[in-house]
């Protein structure tokens, strides 16, 4: 993307760590008393572990066999239902924590720099940002309209898509529920 008469300011998201998805899911099940319906667990590849048939991201799963905790379809629907309900129901998103280093050449303040800790200046800076999925979802809603016109927003949206369940939890708009469909199609 090139803007005439204006310097393009970039931001790079590196060293991202996400934790607390399993804890957030437990909060959801405790709230709804739905432990018997849980279908999440360790991905061991194929039908070992929770099995591909239950995996909420099976369309883009790469099966690294790393014994990573993955959300099942029913658990994803539970979480998205709570997001759709909003308010206190969606508080579980605060339990999913994110730490990331932002490397930028921006002199002006970006929206996500408000909570970041590090040296702020006119040159290249690296700051560490500690946030959660609830804050990221709120920020995503604010900037999604500017994605095509703003290089910072493009970088942010690309990074959101790279987060575990970023598409399903942060970008989720409830379209599947509005149309009466489920994640199974």
Image (cartoon, grey):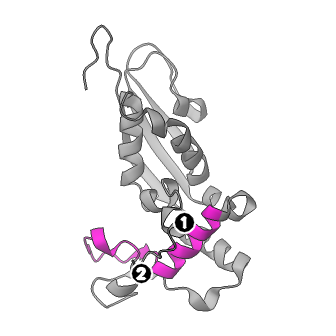
Which span is picked out in magenta? Answer: 56-84
Labelled disc at residue 105: none
Of the 4 image quadrants, the one containing the N terminus is: top left
Q: Secondary structure at mark 2?
A: strand
Residue 105 appearing in the image: yes
In the rendered view, tell whether residue 48 sits above or below residue 97.
Answer: below
Labelled disc at residue 178: 1
Residue 92 appearing in the image: no
| Residue 89: image location, x then y, percent | 71, 65
Of the 4 image quadrants, the one containing the C terminus is: bottom left
| Residue tagged 2 | 42
Is residue 80 shown in magenta?
Answer: yes
Residue farthest toward the top in the current orientation of the protein: 5
Q: Secondary structure at mark 1?
A: helix
Residue in the image at 59% along x and 45% along y:
138
In the rendered view, tell whether residue 2 sits above or below residue 74.
Answer: above
- Between circles 1 and 2, the one closer to the viewer is 1
Q: Is residue 45 left or right of residue 171?
A: left
In the rendered view, tell whether residue 120 sits above or below residue 167.
Answer: above
């Amino acid at each position: 993307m090139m803007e005439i008469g204006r310097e393009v300011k970039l931001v790079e998201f590196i060293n991202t760590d996400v934790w607390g998805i399993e804890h957030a899911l437990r909060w959801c099940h405790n709230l709804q008393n739905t432990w018997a319906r849980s279908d999440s667990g360790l991905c061991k590849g194929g039908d070992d572990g929770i099995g591909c048939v239950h995996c909420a991201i099976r369309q883009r799963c790469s099966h690294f066999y790393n014994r990573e905790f993955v959300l099942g379809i029913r658990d994803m629907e539970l979480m998205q239902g709570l997001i759709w309900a909003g308010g206190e129901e969606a508080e579980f998103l605060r339990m999913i924590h994110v730490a990331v280093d932002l490397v930028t050449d921006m002199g002006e303040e970006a929206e996500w720099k408000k909570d970041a800790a590090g040296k702020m200046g006119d040159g290249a800076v690296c700051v560490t940002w500690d946030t959660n999925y609830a804050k990221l979802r709120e920020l995503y809603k604010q900037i999604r309209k500017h994605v095509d016109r703003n290089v910072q927003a493009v970088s942010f949206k690309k990074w959101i898509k790279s987060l575990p369940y970023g598409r399903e939890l942060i970008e989720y708009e409830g379209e599947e529920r509005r149309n009466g469909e489920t994640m199974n199609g």
